[in-house]
Amino acid sequence: MGADAAGSGAPIERPEGRYLHGVPDADLKVVGKPWRKIDARARVTGQTRFADDLFAPRMAYCKLLRSTQAHARIVRIDASAAEAMEGVYAVLLGKDLPITFGILPVSQDEHTLCIDKVRFVGDPVAAVAAVDEDTAWEACRKIVVEYEALPLVTDVFTAAATDPEAPHEHRIHDYGRLGNFHRQENLEFGDLAQGFGESDLVREDFFFFEGNTHLPMEEHATLATFDPDGKLCVQSSTQTPHYLHRALAKVLAEHVPAHKIRVIACPNGGGFGGKSDPFSHEIAVAMLSIRTGRPVKVTLTREEVFYTHRGRHPVLMRSRIGVSRSGRIKALDFETHLDGGAYGSYGTASTFYTGALQCVTYHVENYWFRGARYFTNKAPCGPKRGHGTPQPRFALEVQMDKLAVELGLDPVRIRKDNLVPANSLTANWMRVGTMALGRCIDQVVAGSGFLDRWQKLPHGKGVGLACSSYLSGAGLPIYWNAMPHSGVQLKLDRSGLVTVFCGSTDIGQGSNSILAYVVGEVLGLDPQDLRIVTSDTDLTPVDLGSYSSRVTLMTGNAALQAAERARDLIAPHVADKLGVPRNRIGFAKGRVFDVSDPDQGMPFADAVQLAESKLGTIGTTGSYRPPKSPARYKGGGVGPSANYSFTAAVVEVDVDPETGIYTVPRIFVAHDIGRSINPCLVMGQVEGSVYMGLGEAMMEEMSYRSDRFGVHKIPSMLDYKSPTTMEMPELITWLVGDPDPNGPFGAKEAGQGPLLPIMPAVANAVFDAVGVRVDEVPITPEKVFEGIERARKGKEPRVGPTKTPHVDWPEARKVRTPWQGGTGLEVEREQEELAAARANGGASRERRGD
Amino acid sequence: MLRLPKFSYHRPASGAEAVRIVAAHGGEARYVAGGTDLYPNMKRRVQRPGHVVALSRCQDLRGMRGEARSGVTIGAMTTLSAIEHDPRLRAEYPGFVHAASVVSTPLLRNMGTIGGNLLLDTRCNYYDQSHEWRESIDFCKKCDGSTCWVAPSSPRCWAVQSSDTVPLLCAIDASVTLLGADGERRVPLRALYRDDGIDFVQKRHEELLTALHLPATNGWRASYRKLRRRGSFDFPVLGVGACLSMDGDRVAELDVRIGGAGSWPIPAQKTVEMLRGAVLRFDDAASDELIRAAAQEAYKPTRAMDNTDLDAHWRKKMAPVFVARAIRDCLPGAPPRRDVLG
Amino acid sequence: MSPREAPDRRKTLGEFRVNGERREVAYEPHRTLLEVLREDLDLTGTKHGCELGECGACTVLVDGVPVLSCLTLAQEVEGCAIETIEGMADKGELHPLQDFFAELGASQCGYCSSGFMLASKALLAQNPSPSRDEIRVALSGNLCRCTGYVKIYEAVELAAKKLRGEPCEPSRECTHGR
């Protein structure tokens, strides 16, 4: 854009400037205030246009025919009867789109429509465009598909036992490791033998976290329009328009080049990670629009949303932990088994995430992580709020509770004694910056009266404590590149309007508003007066998407840089005009003025005109890329972040010992947010996270019938249980923390972290209430009852798994910890690097992880 | 979006006219009251009537009359919300009102009627599924297929009685009026239902349920205990209705019906027999023990299967607990019910 | 019409009273109110999340009573007063419920909001001073996946206060935490 004076050369990892974390609250005019969201009015008047609210002239409706078999070869497919129907415009089959796609470069394993085999009930097989939805549905019923069944795999034990010598088609995919293993990872940090040797107490526990799904209120929808001039526009309920753009460009390469594809992410009616992959239905309508020359819309049914899934992985875990008599963690040997479903999706990242954040809450001296992901004939799993970390967090926090009881410590003490220090490196080379978990714990413990009630309440009533941490955005993009993760452009108009262009996608969390608050703060404008243009690949610079809690931090930093550059363009000209030094120019309340004499100044619009008359059209850009991570080993790319949020929660339960039915009267939660850009929006994120965590803790689960052809047992809003108003407890929330240097104005994430402690806190509270350990999520009344019955019969009052599948793990990649003098690289690469450094005179070459 | 299939929509002005239309079209026709049961089933293509006969204009199916001393008659088209909020019913039939008020959600109770609730289709999570889903299991015995996937070797269908009001209304011995092509008949609810997931009502296809008759309130007390996952939306996966009349401290009459755990409201016969004539007091350890022991007999007849929410074995184990609680609720001195769970 | 005669399955002309306006629509007799509102009247503020009565997103008011438009046949409500979210603001001025849903972020993604606000409006018409538990029960047929309902309760309570003419400032606990 025009006169981007500060254009090149500036570091994009951390915008420098006065408006960072160091500014005291009192000096902020916009940041830190509970503003309305800039689009709140549209959302409460029904004027927000979600994808299914779009209608176009001549629009055709699309329906997908989905597999009725869980694992089968497609022997024959005949669509002639459907094609011959009146009102049917086009029928698309797998062979029409032979190029594969997938969110990660390492797992390009999806076809838009299955070609020769189907991998789960619900796998898309054909797509029809017709005059209306009824006709499209009828046409799907007329497509004949003949299947030949293949062996069904619906759990990790069966997947692990797949005969490596069996015909290749018995494998669900023919990539990945042998059989139905997708990934096997083995990472060792420090000296485990020594760590366990020094331990006074070693516990081994098994845990299981059942899969669950996002259940956004909005069913996914997409409208594709292929223009007469050969350009394709895809408007979709997606959290990641940029990644969808890449997938469309790849699959449709023969039909339309990347630069002629425009993706617009509509406002999402809830995402939670479930709209982060490129999906078959999005690509199918694009192709149908090319075929028919009409706009084509698809809206999934709720059942199809269950098949689209990409939700929480079911994870079976084994955790062996060694502690000193005083409860200090000496060694942790953690093993995860992820039931991935039928496709790769984000699964490689998910696998690493099940091992990434264990050391970010508590200091672990020596850490061993092994994780395996399996393919099974179920809807593909992927990222759901907390992506891969709630499962191990559940295990670790319940195990901490068990350790406390066994050592005669209290759950507060053992956690506080182990807290990871601020500004430190963990055993697996995660860099922790500001860290207020101790204060979070103090708040919820004092606020709930935890220590006066734990182990002291009458039978049936209990309290449980748990903690967590989460990343404010993934340190690496999904495909390797050196470009910014977030870009912002500002256009300054003579009218005084500032338009903010950014590729980010508002999924309800308020990310559009964050851009307005940041730019409004720097330029002294009312955030409601700004124009925010987002999530349109034709108009806006790339932002990688609304996932991994990255948006506020990354777009916020990019917007900050763009706004500071705009200020720096304008200020000198106003200073010259006022005849004051440039460093005395301030921006506030829609004016630009002399800070020593605020009456001397001009309206912002005049300042823009002044600058424009000197410089030409005024525009700036801002970019952001997270800081380089010290975790340089292979696999170290998952987990690093510019900063981490922390949360502590106390949950109360009221258990009916006669039935196992329990209610949750109150939850206390404290979240280390750094500094809130808008505390009211942060509160909303915390409350929503607690709600979703409670649903996972109590009732939500993806269930399949392995003995009935692998069908999803309950693909409906009624039978997939999402808590209603009747289940939501009273919630007492504290926002704590100090501004973090890496966050815009000191902000950290809020959308995922507060979900994590809820499940283990419920489990710990149930134990406190009735002495039953449910080492599984969800913690259903049947399981609580079973534990109570076991206790009555003199058996161990525990419900949960007792084993993990056998895995021939690959050899461990050994990494020395920071306190062993490591470099963040694997030991063998350290030596290679040392040798290379010696050879070319000391210059070491940095390499990024996987 | 899930949509309804095409059908012809009839809107007769009286029950008699509605009966004539259904009689004329036979199995092709279905009555619709609130639509909260039929329309989801039609969207899922488990019901495919070519003719839908709406009762919304039939004024003769509306209204309430009578009084508690002699019994109250409620028109079949009365919504569950109207029952829930009727001050007289709340005062005189609190057990029934409670059962009506825990049906699904307030929105569905604004639409759903008592007639519809009494004739609610049996439910099963192999049946309450879309056409596409059911194709994956090659359909089931209740619709388009031949196997009952709940118990494939069984010759019958195991779909579940899922109305909240039915167990209680059977326990209090309510009755209904059925209007047929050749006139009306009054049928006790206890005789209306059959233990079969498909043929669960003993009435002719064109017979129209026009009214519910609540018996006179002459000292009996009734209670409904519902087991479900959430405090709203969910159908009962166990629902116990109990009705008790005392003669001083002695049980004069008792009836207990178990819903949500079989294809019909199962009578807890043994429990009733064990407690007949027993001395029972509220908040009394000996009475509680007596009730608990008798309620244990409800375990055996409960037919919880793996076709609803929550584990079938646990649901069966909960039957005695819920039966005991429902009976205790009916003892003089027991507090009124306000809970929505258990 | 004799009992055997079948009503037409083709489009018929109907007249609806939506948000105080009379609207004529030609529609097929098997269409639900949801379909007619969204697809024939362009009132897309009414949402759908399941079309089976399992989520509450499609709630509208019919003669002031909240019902599910996905299970209501359009024919059944011809002549009734239908209110959708588009009719809630008065000449551009937000209804107090809308105002507080906006103010507190009780509308995050906003997809369930129209259903919640209409169900709340019906509640406040019946009960101007509902307790938290009464709000909870009245809204128990509407699912929200974003908010955890907390801000929704608070917005309804503040709107009730405003409608009663009482002071109605959000508490600091609500917007900033404790």
Image: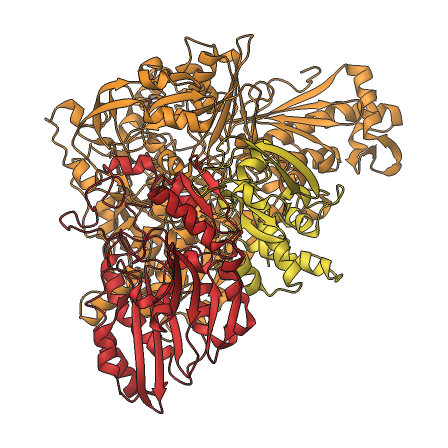
Chain colours: A orange, B red, C yellow
Residue A483 left/right relative to C92? left
**Residue C65 sits in which quadrant?**
bottom right
In the picture as drawn, the residue positioned furthest to the bottom comes out as B248
Occupied quadrant, residue A326: bottom left
- Residue B125 percent across, percent down from the top left: 30, 48
Q: Quadrant of the C terminus of chain C?
A: bottom right
Specify the farthest residue to the left: A165
Numbered-mark total: 0
Report whether A69 appears left or right of A482: left
Image height check: is B211 above or below B295?
Answer: above
Above or below, A287 against B141 in this view is above
Work out whether residue B117 or residue A271 is closer to the camera in this orientation and state it. B117
- Residue B146: % across, % down: 19, 42
**Apparent side of residue B165 relative to residue B310 in the rendered image (left or right):** right
Picture quadrant of residue A827:
top left
Q: Is residue A849 visible?
A: no
Q: Tell me if I can see residue B277 in this picture.
A: yes
Residue at 72% across, 58% down: C163
Residue A647 in percent (x, y) is at 47, 52
Please state which of residues A214 and B28 is positioned toward the viewer in this rendering.
B28
Q: Looking at the picture, does residue A785 appear above or below residue B329?
A: above
Question: Residue A173 versus residue A551: which sits nearer the camera?
Answer: A173
Along the line of sight, which residue is nearer the eye, C32 or C163?
Answer: C32
Residue, x 47% and y 55% (percent of image)? B15
User: Residue A682: x percent and y percent?
Assistant: 57, 47
